[in-house]
Image: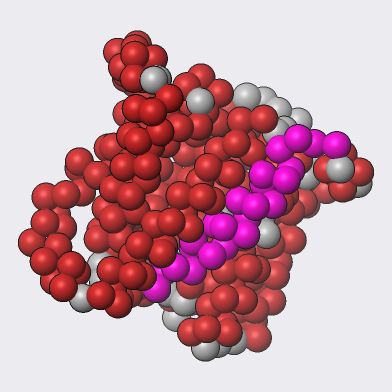
């Protein structure tokens, strides 16, 4: 089950990043995040309503959920801004650093110990993702001048911490509860911002003209987080993140087969490394 959920998160995030970039560039970060979290808040509420009194009465769980929500909110804003203003070929290699950050947190805080072969495969996944998402091996020269990189670095730290906190929250409460809670938190923050900034007319106008895009990004992004939250119930967080974060390789595959894009030799090598490492990692984890 854990492997299945991790692969579902992989597919959903692969498609979701493309739609998030499209939405952020069309509506702006706050509106895009508002639409995504509004859908999550409304749709998930019936499934968690009965458990709300229990969570509300438990101060430790409430603090954990609130802290997780605050971190993911800040990380999402940086993530959206990086995708909005930056080049994917430069931004995505930075995002790949989420994997080791999350794995380190899980190892030190939760004492999740992986076998030697699992550690080696996780390292190969990180290497493969990095190669696939880097057009030029000397990309660091371009990084110095890219506007979106500083946002990507902040987003990476935030998302690494978010992956860890969502995993802990899922195990402490419930996967649907943490997803609903952080959706509500971000929905409220976006609602306040859009009200104070006077963007309601634009927001309503975008809803009427762009319903298909709004519903698509909302459903897929929420599905990715729910799938990831369930995957960590069955898998070590480091394994779940390594598999699901391989969506970058999936995006490259979609580009090859759907857009007839050409990759460079090191990108093909990275694609092969990632696919093989993820498949083997999933296989030995099932055993």
Residue drawn 77% across the image and 51% down it: 131
114 lies above or below 234: below
Q: Residue at x 27, y 37 (%)?
A: 39
Q: Residue at x 33, y 34 (%)?
A: 191
Residue 108: % across, % down: 58, 84
Q: Which residue ends up furthest to the front in the rendered image?
A: 196
What colour scheme governs how the chains and residues are painted in the rendered image of this protein? secondary structure
- In terms of depth relative to the viewer, which is nearer, 122 or 148? 148
Asked which quadrant contains residue 264, the reply is top right
Q: Would you say 159 lies left or right of 149 here? A: left
Total numbered circles: 0
In this view, the residue in front, 183 or 117, is: 183
Q: Is residue 21 left or right of residue 176?
A: right
The x and y percentages for residue 261 are: 70, 28
The residue at the far left in this view is 50
Instruction: Work out which quarter of the rendered image holds the C terminus and state it.
Output: bottom left
Q: Quadrant of the N terminus?
A: bottom left
Q: Is residue 36 above or below residue 2?
A: above
Q: Picture coordinates of residue 279 (x, y %)?
A: 55, 63
Q: Residue at x 67, y 25 (%)?
A: 260
Can residue 19 be spotted in the picture? no
Task: Say left or right for 98 vs 285.
Answer: right
Task: Kindly report the secondary structure that dominates the magenta region of the rendered protein.
Answer: helix
User: What span is in magenta?
Assistant: 145-169
- Is residue 50 in view? yes
Q: Closest to the observer: 222 or 59?
A: 59
Image coordinates of residue 105 in percent, x first then y, are 57, 76
Q: Is residue 45 magenta?
A: no
């Amino acid at each position: 089950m854990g492997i299945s959920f991790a692969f579902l998160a992989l597919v959903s995030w692969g498609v979701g990043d493309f739609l998030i970039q499209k939405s952020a560039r069309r509506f702006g970060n706050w509106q895009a995040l508002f639409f995504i979290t509004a859908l999550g808040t409304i749709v998930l509420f019936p499934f968690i309503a009965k458990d709300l009194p229990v969570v509300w009465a438990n101060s430790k769980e409430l603090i954990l959920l609130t802290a997780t929500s605050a971190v993911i909110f800040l990380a999402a804003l940086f993530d959206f801004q990086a995708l909005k203003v930056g080049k994917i070929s430069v931004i995505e290699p930075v995002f790949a650093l989420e994997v080791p950050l999350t794995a380190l947190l899980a190892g030190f805080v939760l004492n999740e110990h992986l076998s030697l072969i699992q550690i080696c495969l996780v390292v190969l996944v990180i290497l493969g993702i990095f190669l696939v998402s880097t057009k030029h091996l000397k990309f660091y020269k371009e990084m110095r001048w890219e506007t979106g990189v500083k946002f990507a670095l902040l987003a990476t730290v935030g998302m690494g911490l978010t992956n860890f906190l969502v995993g802990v929250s899922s195990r402490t409460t419930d996967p649907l509860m943490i997803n609903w809670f952080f959706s509500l938190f971000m929905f409220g923050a976006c609602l306040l911002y859009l009200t104070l900034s006077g963007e309601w007319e634009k927001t309503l106008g975008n809803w009427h003209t762009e319903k298909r895009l709004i519903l698509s990004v909302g459903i897929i992004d929420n599905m990715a987080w729910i799938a990831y939250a369930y995957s960590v119930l069955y898998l070590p967080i480091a394994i779940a993140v390594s598999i699901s974060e391989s969506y970058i390789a999936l995006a490259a595959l979609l580009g090859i087969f759907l857009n007839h894009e050409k990759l460079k030799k090191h990108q093909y090598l990275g694609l092969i490394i990632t696919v093989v490492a993820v498949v083997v990692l999933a296989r030995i984890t099932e055993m």
